[in-house]
Amino acid sequence: MTGWLDDLARLAAAGPVAMVSVLATEGSAPRGAGTRMLVTMDGLAGTIGGGALEFRAVEQARSVLDHAPGTWRVQDYPLGPMLGQCCGGRVRLLVEHVDRDTLSWQAEASEGRVLVSVLRERGIERRVTDGPAASLSARGDKPREGSRLAEVIGGFRRPLYLFGAGHVGQAIARHVDGLPIRLAWFDTRPVFEMIAGVTVVPESAAEQCVVEAPDEAALVILTHDHALDYRLTLAALRRSPLAFTGLIGSQTKRARFLARLERDGASAEARGRLTCPIGLPGVTGKEPDVIAVALLAQLLQLPPVAAVRAVAA
C-alpha cells in the first residue's frame, strides 16, 4: 500500500520521474483514490488500473517530463465517453513532473499519517502531518493553484483482530500480505510467541483486546478453546458494533452459541451481528488455506470506510 514511496525514492535518485496520482473516482473505476504510478521516459512502477486509462495517463506523464520539474496538471477522464472503457466511471488524476529537490517530506512519511499537498504555480508543496482527511469529488471544479489536498498514506486498511494462531490463523496471516487489511494477531498460548506477528496475551486480557478494537475492525475468533471463543464473542456483541464479528465453526456450534448468548442477555440485534460459519457461502473446503481465502474474500466485501481512505480537498 506504500510501495510507491520506495519507487519514488529509487526512481528520483536515478533521473527525471513523473508521478500519476488518483485524486478521486466515481462509479466503476479501475483503482481508488490514493493509487499512484511512477513514470520515466522508458519505464513504469505501479499501476492505476491498466487499459486505456493507464495508456493515456502514461502519455500525459511523459509529456509533462518535457516541462520543468514541479509542473503539474489535473486531468479528468470519463471512462466511457473519452476512453471507451465499459466500466463507465470517472477518474480525476494529478500528473506531475516530480521536483527532486522537494522530497524532504519522505523522511517523515509512514503508513497511516496524512500527506498534505498544496498546489502552487511553480510546483507542489508537501508535508506530512497527523491531520484528518475527507473526500474529493471526481466531478465539479478541478483543484487549482492554491488547492490543498490531504490523504492518508497507504489508504485505509481494515484492522483485522484475529484470535487464534493455529493452522487456520497461520493460513489467514499468510494470505493477508498485499490486501488492504492490517493484522492484529493474538493467542493466549506462550508456545506461539515464536511465530512472527503473534501477540501472546493472558486469557484475562483477551476480552479487553476486543473491547478496545476500533469500530471499523473485523474480529475473527478461532481459538483452541470453545469457552474462550464464547467469552470473546460475548464481549464483541456487548460493545459498540464492529464492522464484522466472525466465529469459526459449524451450524451446530452457531446454534449452541446463539442459544447461550440469548440466555446471557445478548439482544436479537446483537446476535444478528455474529457471522458463523465464516467465509464466503458456497466455498466448502475445510483446508486451512481454503478457509483463509474464503474469509478474506468475505472481509473484502465489507463496505469501505470512505472518510478514512479518501483524498481530501
Image (cartoon, helix red, strand yellow):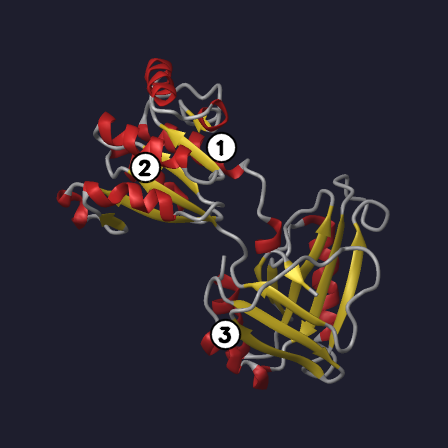
Depth check, mark 2 against mark 1: the one in front is 1
Secondary-structure class at tag 2: helix
Whole-percent x, y for residue 287 in the image: 32, 25
In space, the residues marked 3 and 1 are separated at their CA atoms by 35 Å
Task: Count every numbered label the image shows and give the total.
Answer: 3
| Label 3 residue SS | helix
- Report which residue position mark 2 lands on: 171
- Residue 294, percent from left and from top: 44, 30
Counting residues from the N terminus, which is met first, the one under dot 3 or under dot 1?
Answer: 3
Q: Nearer the viewer, residue 96 or 109?
A: 109
**Label 1 residue SS:** helix
Q: Quadrant of residue 257?
A: top left
Residue that appears at 20% across and 42% down: 204
Please tell me which residue is depicted at 78% across the width and 77% down the height of the picture.
Answer: 145
Q: Residues within 10 Å of mark 3 (few under 14, many from 20)?
A: few
Q: Amino acid at mark 2?
A: Ala
- Per the model, the C-alpha gap separating discs 2 and 3 is 33 Å
Q: Earlier in the sequence, mark 2 or mark 3?
A: 3
Estimate the x, y position of residue 68 in percent, counting from the top left: 72, 84
The residue that mark 1 highlights is: 298
Is 133 positioned to the left or the right of 88 in the image?
left
Residue drawn 57% across the image and 48% down it? 305
Q: Classify 10 Å Cα crowding around label 1: few (below 14), some (14-19), many (20 and above).
A: some
Between disc 2 and disc 3, the foreground one is: 2
Q: Nearer the viewer, mark 3 or mark 1?
A: 1
Horizontal arrangement in the rendering, residue 160 relative to residue 19 (left or right): left
Q: Residue at x 76, y 45 (%)?
A: 89
